[in-house]
Amino acid sequence: MPPASQVAVGGSTSNVLLLRNGALYTWGGNASGQGGAGNTSSRPSPSQILAGQNFTSVTKGHSHVVALRDDGTVWAWGLNANGQLGTGNRTNSPTPVQIVIPLP
């Protein structure tokens, strides 16, 4: 496995690992879909999210994750009770969704 670039951990929610090659992995708690694998099952070992995509940065909040791809797009998944995913609704997303930023 290539060297790590960034890691985000905390509480009983998913942990997130960004590798230097841009690959993104999650593992751990997943009750709100914050693992990004399309379900809410906890995972005891890392699973790649959006294989084939290159990420440059990742952060996590309370049961949600936001990641920046190398093309400048922003992706989010997990808990969305307060609209924290930026999707225009309050529906949790167990898979990454692109955040569309309205231009002024």
Image (tube, grey):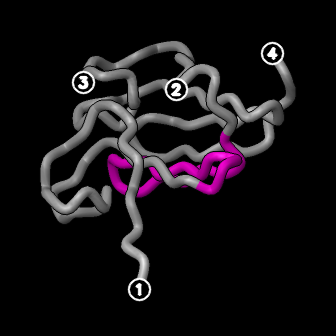
- The answer to whether residue 53 is magenta is no
Q: Secondary structure at mark 4?
A: loop
Q: Secondary structure at mark 1?
A: loop
Mark 1: few/some/many CA within 10 Å (<14, 14-19, 20+): few
**Sequence-earlier tag: 4 or 3:** 4
89 over 55 or under it: above or below: below
Badge nearest the viewer, 1 or 3: 1
Which of 14 and 59 lies nearest the eye of the viewer?
59
Q: Spatial distance from mark 1 to mark 3, Cα to Cα? A: 36 Å
The residue that appears at 37% across and 73% down in the rendered structure is 102
- Disc 4 marks which amino acid? Met
For the record, the magenta segment spans 55-72
Q: Spatial distance from mark 2 to mark 4, Cα to Cα? A: 17 Å
The circle on residue 50 is: 2
The residue that appears at 51% across and 54% down in the rendered structure is 74
The residue that appears at 52% across and 36% down in the rendered structure is 15
**Residue at numbered disc 3:** 40
**Residue at numbered disc 4:** 1
Q: Spatial distance from mark 3 to mark 2, Cα to Cα? A: 16 Å
Q: Position of residue 92 (x, y in %)?
A: 19, 43
The residue that appears at 62% across and 46% down in the rendered structure is 69
- Disc 3 marks which amino acid? Thr
**Residue at numbered disc 1:** 104
